[in-house]
Amino acid sequence: MLVRTLDELVAVVPRLRIDHARGPAKPYKPLMLLSVLLLIEKGEIIDGRVYLDGALKSVYKQLLAAVFPAWPFRADPRYPFRHLANDQVWRLVPSDEHESDLAALLVAGGKARNVMKHVACARLDTTLFATLAASRSARTTAADAVIATWLPSLARTVFYGFLSATPQPPVTAAAHAEAWSERALEEHLERHWRRTPFASRGVALSTVEKWGRPGRQVLTDVNAIDLLGFEQASRTWWVFELKKGRPDDSVVGQIARYIAKIREDVDSRGELVRGAIIAKDVSEKLRYSARSVANLELWRYRLPDVTLERV
């Protein structure tokens, strides 16, 4: 039976089936759970659906690198995502027209890489998600159980270091559809970055390998940056924030904090920082609010062709 309450989730944590093959116990399931809790905290997961998209993969990799900086094994996020369904943490939802294929693979114990080809997302129980989304205390209770059972004490410092001072307010019912469209936009921009006007200006999405930071859902102590780019020619960092149904003043304040955070980190190297808000609609209030932040641009996106135009 699917985990329905916070107490049930806490009770399941010690019973997670952890991979002990070839060396130490693998922290993949615990880190996947912490990743989901962080994305709920930051307003990126707005209902019970959990997608193994670029956002979740990025947070998972950042946590692994922070908690186990010398981890020697390949940590494919498809495996904990698939196998947390075996622990009844969530259920796997088939992609269109793949329901029978997914059911057959699950019955046969199919390998994660094959199962995930037929999965659209995972779904938490609605009651459990509502509890986690409504209460930081619930999220930290779940996180504490995961860390105390499976992870070194460093994980607690890492996890709490990534919690923002103020939790992201829940997405209102009226803004729900817009938030989902902008979540899809974030995924589209990451996948098709080379087609954007920013890429034509020489801005590339950051990578850990090249510039020391990921390019999506970049965890900081002032929340998570949606997208982070770097313009090599001018040595300029670009902070991109999607509005996601939030009030105008809120999104401007958020990106101002991100810009300040990155500037604090890179100023000693003589690097610059710029920002861009990408929104479906740009109100006069948003225009005036944005003028209060130096080097901040406003961009509007249009569907269904996902074109971007500067406002």
Image (tube, grey):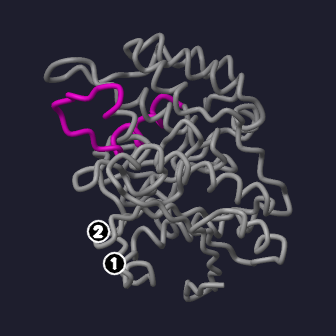
Given contact means CB atoms under 8 Å apart, are the residues at marks 2 and 1 in contact?
A: yes
Specify the quadrant that holds the N terminus. top right
Q: Looking at the image, can residue 30 be seen?
A: yes
Q: Is residue 86 left or right of residue 74?
A: right
Q: Looking at the image, can residue 99 be seen?
A: no
Residue 173 position, x and y percent, is 84, 57
Label 1 crowd bin: few (<14), some (14–19), many (20+), radius 10 Å: some
Task: Using the image, tell me which numbered label, if any, was put on residue 202.
Answer: 1
Residue 282 position, x and y percent, is 75, 77
Comparing 151 with 261, the one in front is 261
- Residue that mark 2 sits on: 232
Q: Is residue 129 left or right of residue 61?
A: right
Q: Residue at x 44, y 59 (%)?
A: 228
Label 2 crowd bin: few (<14), some (14–19), many (20+), radius 10 Å: few
Most frequent secondary structure within the magenta stretch: loop
| Mark 2 to mark 1 CA distance (whole Å) | 7 Å
Say what secondary structure mark 1 lies in. Answer: loop
Q: Is residue 133 above or below residue 135?
A: below
Going from N to C along the chain, the mark reached first, 2 or 1, is: 1
Q: Check residue 8 for magenta coloring.
A: no
Magenta part of the chain: 65-88
Comparing 146 with 88, the one in front is 146
Q: Is residue 290 left or right of residue 149?
A: right
Q: Residue at x 30, y 56 (%)?
A: 207
Q: Residue at x 45, y 33 (%)?
A: 86
Q: Is residue 31 above or below residue 269?
A: above
Residue 237 position, x and y percent, is 41, 61
Q: Is residue 199 above or below residue 167?
A: below
Q: Is residue 139 left or right of residue 169?
A: left
Classify residue 67 by image quadrant: top left
Q: Amino acid at mark 1?
A: Gly
Task: Using the image, tell me which numbered label, if any, was put on residue 105.
Answer: none
